[in-house]
Image: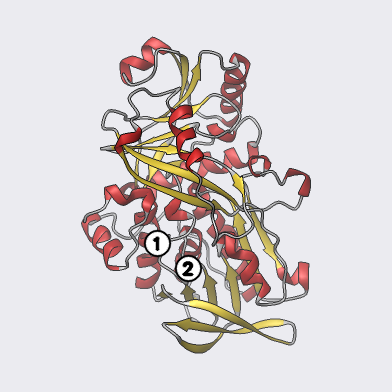
Amino acid sequence: MNRTETVLVVGGGVTGVGVARDLAMRGVDVTLAERGTFAGGTSGRSHGLLHSGARYAVDDLRGAKECLEESEVLKQIAPHCLDETGGFVVQVEGDDPDYFERVREACDELGMGTETLTGEEARTEEPGLVKEVERVLRVPDGVVHPSRLTVANGMDASERGAEVLSGTGVTDLRLEDGRVAGATLEREGESREIDVSYVVNAAGPWAGAVAGLAGCEVEMAPTSGVMVAVEYDSLGTVLNRARAPDDGDIVIPHPEEAILGTTARSIDDPDEVPEEEWEVEAMFEECGAMLSGLDPEQVTRTYWGVRPLYSEDRETWEGRGISRGFYLLDHGERDGVEGLVTITGGKLTTYRGMAEATTDFVCRDLGVDEPCRTAEELLWGADDPEALDRAVVETDARNPADADLLPT
């Protein structure tokens, strides 16, 4: 394969590095620029849930289907970046039993393997469940380690010839005859110009700012959410509350901790996230309705993440009403700027599928005829997880979502 085209990927979250890996595997010359550290934005400040799709199955079948399909792929290509814990959709006394049934029916429609347990049966497996838990639906959720997953993709891309840069901002996009032709990269106060054939905007909540460098508009609808890590060594299963997505209805198990989440507050600027104490308190109240023994005195870290939400239907622009499906925006069609595409929305779980769709689009436009292989080939570090952990530390990619799982 001859490398004849240069694609600039903007954003070093998991989607951006996934695009860089896919492009490099298809023989395309790639430069990836991340202004901060890898996974330092949305990816590494998530709750780290490997979504089966059950959480969204009732109201967002498209997003749920994407999650189910991609979670199964990740179990095959990235076993060193996740834990197959399984999950419970938990009905607590006072919850609407009809909603539980709707979740089960939607999961059945997706072809998801589920099992219904009584509260007593569930407490046999997870003794920390409160006595008010009446029944649970077992679903194939899991736990992702975002820092590892992102760096594994970045290392994979780099070993295939991509230039993968952290601490490197994109400050300008140059247009020639209505097409993106170059970019200005800035690193440690020094700038350099590069020529490009294509730009992939994978900047998450900052996608609007990047598109603006080319005179294009992407109006994002970002929401922030708190995660609280608390000492807790006796939970082995993901917990989801059996109700429409709301504050404090997810608990993620780590070996020595539980991650409680999350809120959803609309914000204007992803660089200015308000951090309110009531959000932290709400996590203990709401998550404590499922799991006993959560102690506010045992908090190990608290962090806020920002979701890169987008919707062309402004009537759904209340954070939890926006689909968690992804959007691929062609700025040639939308804005008359060729050679620029934005990939946004989606979930951590669906990053690989988002990257495949983006890379398919770019390669068609550039005339590159190579198939996607990212769903078949193991990610970097699968045969040496300790090397991956060293790479995470060396690239300064330790992030709050999985900080407790990485070496000091």
Image height of 355 relative to 193, above or below: above
Quadrant hosting residue 356: bottom right
Q: Position of residue 279 (x, y in %)?
A: 50, 40
Observer-nearest of 315 and 149: 315
- The reply to whether residue 378 is in sight is no
Residue 388 horizontal side relative to residue 311, left or right: left
Q: Position of residue 180 (x, y in %)?
A: 66, 81
Quadrant hosting residue 38: bottom left
Asked if labels 1 and 2 touch by Cβ distance under 8 angstroms, the answer is yes
Q: Earlier in the sequence, mark 2 or mark 1?
A: 2
Q: Position of residue 131 (x, y in %)?
A: 40, 12
Image height of 237 relative to 274, above or below: above
Residue at which label 2 appears = 20
Image height of 238 relative to 228, above or below: above
Going by the numbered disc 2, the residue's amino acid type is Ala
Helix or strand or loop: what does disc 2 sit on? Answer: helix
Residue 351 horizontal side relative to residue 222, left or right: left
Q: Residue at x 56, y 22 (%)?
A: 104
Going by the numbered disc 1, the residue's amino acid type is Asn
Q: Position of residue 178 (x, y in %)?
A: 74, 82
- The reply to whether residue 380 is in sight is yes
Q: Residue at x 51, y 82 (%)?
A: 185
